[in-house]
Image (cartoon, rainbow, N blue to C red):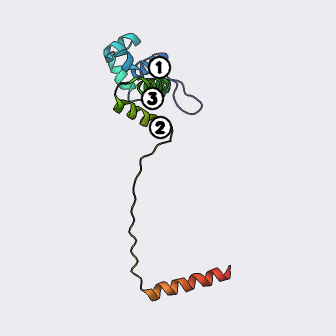
Amino acid sequence: MKSREDGRAVLHASQRLAAEMLATNDIHQKTMQQIANEVGIDIRTIYRWKQDPDFIEYQNDIAEKVMTSFLAETYNILRNIVRGSDSERNKLRAIELVLKNQGRMTDVQKVEAKIEDDRSNEAIDAEIERLKKLLGQI
């Protein structure tokens, strides 16, 4: 196996094909044996490749690209739900997802903090005087 400039291995064509098929297997829905047969390798080879960091990285890269192209389809479906759903609940949920995705709607969280200060009034007064002196030196 060759090595690239960055030290990572260059995958063979059969490795790339197997990784691409695995990354998009939700579309093809093939068994591991079917993928191995199409690539022309033994099924054990696929399991061995699935342990290879370079193979995993390439498969993940393909999966990311597929998801990026899937994003446009997802937005179309959300728009269709907003415009055409008979269910008000489905419309509102789709609108909420769109607004959250665009950063225009966030969940509100209430944060409470209880600060305890066990210093005496004299200690606090002394701290105030010390800070006033520091400010006077500036």
Foreground label between 3 and 2: 2
Q: Position of residue 123 (x, y in %)?
A: 46, 86
Q: Secondary structure at mark 1?
A: helix
Task: Write down the residue under mark 3.
Answer: 60
Relative to 96, is 132 above or below?
A: below
Q: Secondary structure at mark 3?
A: helix
Tell me whether the residue at label 1 lies in contact with that at label 3, contact meaning CB atoms closer than 8 angstroms.
Answer: no
The amino acid type, in three-letter code, at marker 1 is Arg
Compare marks 3 and 2 and give the one earlier in the sequence: 3
Mark 3 surroundings: few (<14), some (14-19) or many (≥20) residues within 10 A: some
Instruction: Say which of 102 and 128 sits in front.
Output: 102
Relative to 27, is 65 above or below?
A: below
Mark 1 surroundings: few (<14), some (14-19) or many (≥20) residues within 10 A: some
The amino acid type, in three-letter code, at marker 3 is Asn
Compare marks 1 and 2 and give the one earlier in the sequence: 1
Spatial CA span between label 1 and label 3: 12 Å
Q: Position of residue 30 (x, y in %)?
A: 33, 15
Foreground label between 1 and 3: 3
Q: Is residue 51 left or right of residue 57?
A: left
Q: Is residue 135 left or right of residue 31?
A: right
Task: Write down the residue under mark 1.
Answer: 16
The amino acid type, in three-letter code, at marker 2 is Leu
Task: Write down the residue under mark 2.
Answer: 99
Mark 2 surroundings: few (<14), some (14-19) or many (≥20) residues within 10 A: few
Q: Is residue 133 left or right of residue 109?
A: right
User: Which residue is pictured at 40% across the width and 71% down the height?
Assistant: 115
